[in-house]
Each structure stands twice: as structure tokens, then as C-alpha cells.
Amino acid sequence: MSSNDKTLRVAIGGDEAAFQLKEVLIEHLRSLGHEVDDFGTYDAEPILYPDVAVAVAQAIAEGRFDRGILVCGTGIGVAIAANKVPGIRAAQAHDTYSAGKARTSNDAQIVTLGARVVGPELAKSIVTTFLDNDFPGGASAAKLARIQEYERGLPHSRL
């Protein structure tokens, strides 16, 4: 179980470049006591990662999962794809500080990692940090509300 003793429903997915890292992370998540649903890919054959990223993001937006983890070669592509789903905030993190801030400052529901950027042990630490943090509101709440306004098409930039 994670350090905050909260079982989460986690959706995970990635492309062939990150297949091995995804498998490591699934084992890690289960060892922490979390429920995990694997959205693929299920082998090292090339796929279109946007399909997996959007499937994970949609499942989270629908409330079927608490959090998501997406992996590809860099973590960039899956973040861009997942962020196309309304209501989703996917944040790329390659260190534990960024993973924690993704949750506490931005209420990100998805963390993305690059298998060609971080090794398995660091990836496990990043994921644990991401899952162990919650959004406290506070000073970041107004910023998050503004992001949500822009997502709905209102208002225009105030700069």
C-alpha cells in the first residue's frame, strides 16, 4: 500500500517504446495495493500511442479511474494526446518534485513518463509520489479554475 494508505483505481497505458517500463510499473502499482487496468500496448509491436493515451484519458474523464499513468519514449506525445480530452490534465514528470507538483499545484489526473528518459527505479518513485499526493486547493485553485474556463472557451486571455 502507498504511504497514504489509499487504494486507487489506476489506468495505465503506453506504446511499444515503453512496453517494458509499463510492465514494471504495473507490478509496482499492484505491490502498493492499487487496482490497475492495463490499456495496452501488450507487446513490443508498433502502435499509435494517441489511441492508448486518449482511451486512458477518456476513462478517467468518465470517472472509471482515479488516476492514470501513460508512458512512451519521451512522455511528451502521450501527454499531448491525453490533454486533448476535455477535463483532463496530463503532466509529464521526470522527477519526483514535478510529479508531486503535478498533483498539488495542478490537480493532474495523469502523469506521463518517458521510458527513454527515466529508468525503472526512478519511474517507480515518480509514480508513487504522484499517487501519494492530493490537490489541496488553496492558492492553486484560482489558477486551476482559470484553466478550466479556457477549456470551456471562456474568457479570452486577459493579457
Image (cartoon, grey):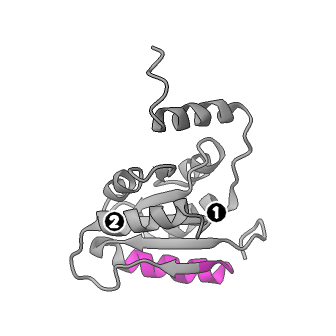
Q: Which residue lies under the disc numbered 2? A: 72
Residue 31 is one of the magenta-drawn residues: yes
Residue drawn at x 43%, y 65% as measured from the top left: 70
Q: Can residue 23 be seen in the rendering of this structure?
A: yes
Report whether 113 appears left or right of 33: left
Q: Which residue lies under the disc numbered 1? A: 131
- Residue type highlighted by circle 2: Cys
Report whether 69 appears left or right of 65: left
Residue drawn at x 77%, y 65% as measured from the top left: 4
From what the image shows, is residue 59 above or below residue 96?
below
- Comparing 92 with 79, the one in front is 79
Residues in magenta, as a range: 20-35
Query: What is the C-alpha distance between the residues marked 1 and 2?
Result: 19 Å
- Where is residue 48, by image quadrant? bottom left
Question: Can you give x and y, in whole percent of width and height, for residue 61 in the image?
Answer: 53, 59
From what the image shows, is residue 22 above or below residue 89?
below
